[in-house]
Image (cartoon, rainbow, N blue to C red):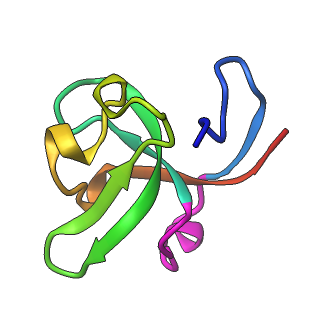
Amino acid sequence: MNPAIQDGQIVWVDYSKEGLIKINIGDILLFKNPQGKNLIIKRVSKIDPNKGYWMTGDNNFPLESTDSNKFGYVKSEYLRGKILFHN
């Protein structure tokens, strides 16, 4: 699968707390890297009420994706927004 969002693409992000209340598998989220200071955009692939969100990239080459395979579950306090639209 090719990445859903490419570098330089314009996205519409819902930064409201309400937007982060109902998160489903398949949603694309903006979150703080648990191992760094940068923001990352990834897709939710698993939800565990105790551990958080398992985030994966759409990249065909898994070793080129910085995702939960490297840093584990993402807790809700790292979430910054939900991607609602991308062109």
Question: Can the viewer see residue 71?
Answer: yes
Question: Can the viewer see residue 76?
Answer: no
Residue 7: where, in percent of width, then height? 64, 19
Residue at 56% of width from left, 63% of height from top? 27
Please name whichever residue, 16 or 50, is drawn nearer the observer in this view of the structure. 50
Quadrant assignment for the N terminus: top right
- Residue 1 shown left or right of residue 31 in the figure: right
Whether 48 is among the magenta residues is no
Whether 22 is among the magenta residues is yes
Residue at 30% of width from left, 40% of height from top? 67
Residue 8: where, in percent of width, then height? 71, 17
Residue 2: where, in percent of width, then height? 61, 36
Q: Is residue 36 above or below residue 60?
A: above
Q: How many marks?
A: 0
Q: Is residue 32 above or below residue 49?
A: above
- Quarter of the image for residue 38 reads top left
Please name whichever residue, 32 or 1, is drawn nearer the observer in this view of the structure. 1
The magenta stretch is: 15-27
Residue closest to the far right: 87
- Residue 8 shown left or right of residue 60 in the figure: right
Residue 16: where, in percent of width, then height? 59, 61
Quadrant assignment for the C terminus: top right
Q: Is residue 71 above or below residue 7?
A: below
Residue at 15% of width from left, 50% of height from top? 72
- Residue 5 shown left or right of residue 57 in the figure: right
Q: Main secondary structure of the magenta part?
A: loop
Residue closest to the far top: 8
Residue at 16% of width from left, 31% of height from top? 35
Q: Is residue 51 above or below residue 75?
A: below
